């Protein structure tokens, strides 16, 4: 017997464990929700081609939904997600469109600043936030699928919620069909076809349920919002996004933002009265750190050419300046506009050499229920 084979046999338990870890990492890493947060016995249903019959099960919101209060009954979790982020095509919940926290999204900001919808529509379609639906479903295609109990369905809005919003309307404006009601709801039938960009989900129609949803299934309901990765670090997402686009991240560090109080970004950090509650405090602090220490060998600011000698260079058309001027005329989608204040009186400044910023970060098996054979 091979010595290597014998070694693998002795380590079979470890191999099984690391195989499971690899599977979990491959399943979890790129998604905008965490599979390992699913309750025991629950799984994700990947809709394949063919006809499917299932019930949509409602759920109560937990404590993480950005809009609804806890214990609000919902038929679906609706949200916006950015796909294809970074070199590993990760998925990031859009904090701007979902109105989360400070509502700042570096990807949406990049789209707006570069007018991608017109300038590069292909890139816009690739990185713009997409509408997604998360449902709890009970599948009836086969006995095996039915015995799995409640599963999670992750699907594009135009494949599901958009269609259900139409067929659930009662004629002559008499209301909506409450298709997720546990006692009097409807069973949904759809058909999937195609692959990739040719994928279609069609034939959405309701059928009467033969009986209410059984208690064994009801007891499997969980709050979908509790498994979603709502929060993301702005700077980490921005860096990941820029790497994915092949942008020069090091060069981008030299592009400083604008101080909302009229000071010099980074240089005047923590010197103005408005610094204490400034929305740019963190970014300004990082810029201040990146400016580095005083270099005595360099000439002071008063040794530089007077401003009138370099007016022509400043007056040259700069695409970035043009974009900034256009943005000032538009309403800011994600932040409240900051009222302009007169710039503070100039003060003596000493030239600082910009050096690389110093990072401070440390590197149940379900009970068998009724079966409906539908095929």
Image (spheres, rainbow, N blue to C red):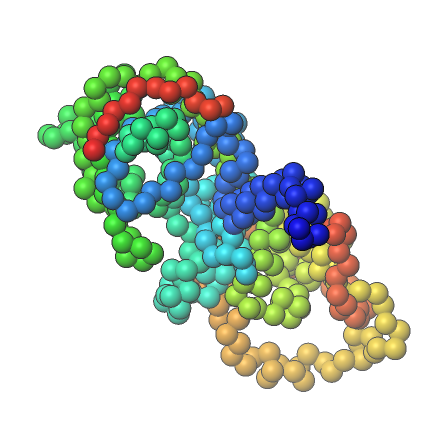
Q: Provide residue 312's location: percent of width, then percent of height.
A: 59, 84
89 relative to 134, above or below: below
The residue shown at (39%, 50%) is 130
Residue closest to the far right:
296
Q: Horizontal placement of 132 versus 266: left or right?
A: left
20 relative to 281, above or below: above
Q: Provide residue 176's location: percent of width, then percent of height.
A: 21, 27
The residue shown at (46%, 30%) is 42
Q: Provide residue 247's location: percent of width, then percent of height.
A: 57, 68
Q: Horizontal placement of 317 versus 295: left or right?
A: left
Residue 120 shows in this picture: yes
In the image, 227 versus 66, the foreground residue is 227
Q: Provide residue 103's location: percent of width, then percent of height.
A: 52, 45
185 relative to 15, above or below: above
Residue 77 shows in this picture: no
In the image, 310 versus 84, the foreground residue is 84
The residue shown at (71%, 56%) is 286
Q: Horizontal placement of 96 versus 187: left or right?
A: right
The residue shown at (69%, 42%) is 10
Q: Horizontal placement of 233 versus 328: left or right?
A: right
For the C terminus, the image quarter is: top left
Quadrant in the picture for residue 169: top left
In the image, 41 versus 106, the foreground residue is 41
């Amino acid at each position: 017997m091979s010595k290597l084979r014998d070694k693998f046999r002795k380590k079979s338990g470890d191999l099984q464990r690391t195989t499971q870890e690899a599977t979990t990492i491959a399943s979890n890493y790129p998604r905008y929700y965490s599979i390992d947060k699913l309750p025991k016995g629950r799984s994700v249903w990947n809709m394949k081609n063919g006809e499917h019959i299932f019930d949509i099960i409602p759920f109560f919101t937990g404590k993480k939904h950005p809009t609804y209060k806890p214990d609000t009954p919902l038929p679906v979790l609706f949200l916006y997600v950015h796909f294809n982020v970074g070199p590993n095509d990760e998925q990031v919940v859009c904090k701007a469109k979902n109105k989360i926290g400070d509502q700042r999204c570096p990807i949406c900001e990049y789209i707006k600043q570069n007018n991608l919808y017109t300038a590069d529509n292909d890139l816009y379609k690739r990185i713009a936030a997409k509408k997604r639906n998360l449902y709890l479903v009970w599948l009836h295609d086969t006995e095996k699928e039915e015995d799995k109990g409640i599963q999670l369905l992750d699907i594009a809005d135009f494949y599901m919620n958009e269609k259900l919003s139409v067929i659930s309307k009662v004629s002559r404006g008499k209301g909506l069909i409450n298709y997720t009601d546990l006692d009097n709801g409807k069973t949904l039938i759809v058909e999937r076809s195609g692959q990739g960009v040719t994928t279609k989900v069609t034939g959405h129609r309701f059928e009467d349920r033969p009986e209410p949803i059984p208690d064994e299934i009801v007891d499997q309901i969980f709050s979908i919002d509790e498994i979603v990765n709502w929060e993301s670090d702005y700077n980490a997402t921005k860096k990941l996004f820029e790497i994915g686009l092949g942008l020069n991240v090091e060069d981008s560090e030299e592009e400083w933002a604008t101080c909302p109080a009229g000071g010099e970004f980074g240089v005047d950090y923590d010197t103005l009265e408005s610094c204490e509650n400034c929305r740019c405090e963190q970014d300004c602090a990082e810029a201040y750190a990146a400016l580095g220490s005083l270099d005595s060998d360099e000439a002071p600011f008063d040794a530089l050419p007077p401003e009138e000698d370099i007016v022509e260079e400043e007056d040259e058309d700069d695409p970035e300046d043009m974009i900034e001027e256009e943005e000032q005329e538009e309403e800011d989608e994600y932040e409240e506009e900051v009222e302009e204040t007169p710039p503070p009186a100039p003060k003596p400044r000493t030239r600082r050499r910009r050096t690389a910023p110093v990072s401070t970060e440390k590197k149940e098996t379900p009970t068998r229920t009724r079966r409906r054979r539908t095929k």
